[in-house]
Image (tube, helix red, strand yellow):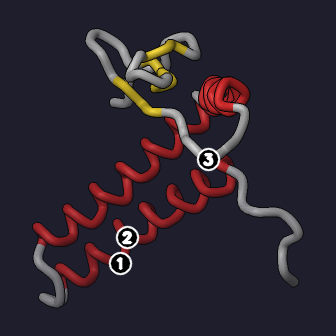
Amino acid sequence: MPQLFAPTLQDQVAEVEREVGLRVRVYRRRVDEGKMTQEKADRGIEVMSAVGLTLRWLQKNEAKIKAALGAALLLAGCAHQPPAVYTPAPEPLIYWLAPGGAHVPLAEPIERMP
């Protein structure tokens, strides 16, 4: 039966974690059978693990991201020009690229991704 709602970040994180576990088991067998190199197996697991880290970071910062995007759209008065993401040192902030090129901060700092 089809789901009524789009998958949440929590759903996506759980699915990626399941996929990483599956890859570990399947890739180990494929390497043992000579059907896959260890390097390719390691890379596939590494990439999927990075997807999980990204989704968990988004999940942790979801409220801040939504607040910043909402503020940007309010400042713009429409959704035609998305906010620019500008990352000055030492920590990223979300800025609105205002007319004339001025960077207007919209939100508190968002935790840097690992």
Work out whether residue 101 or residue 114 is closer to the camera in this orientation and state it: 101
Q: Where is residue 50 in the image (x, y as percent from the top left)?
A: 35, 49
Count the numbered circles shown. 3
N-terminal of the two: label 3 or label 2?
A: 2
**Residue under pointer 2:** 23
Question: Which residue sits at x=72%, y=60%?
Answer: 7
Identified by mark 1, the residue type is Val
Q: Where is residue 111 in the image (x, y as percent from the top left)?
A: 45, 20
**Residue under pointer 1:** 26
- Binning the other alpha carbons within 10 Å of mark 2 as few (below 14), some (14 to 19) or many (20 upward) gives some
Question: Which residue sits at x=73%, y=27%?
Answer: 74
The answer to whether marks 3 and 2 mark residues whose Cβ atoms lie closer than 8 Å is no
- Binning the other alpha carbons within 10 Å of mark 1 as few (below 14), some (14 to 19) or many (20 upward) gives few
- The disc placed on residue 51 is none
Helix or strand or loop: what does disc 2 sit on?
helix
Check the image and report above or below for 35 versus 50: below
Image quarter hosting the C terminus: top left
Identified by mark 2, the residue type is Arg
Work out whether residue 72 or residue 49 is closer to the camera in this orientation and state it: 72
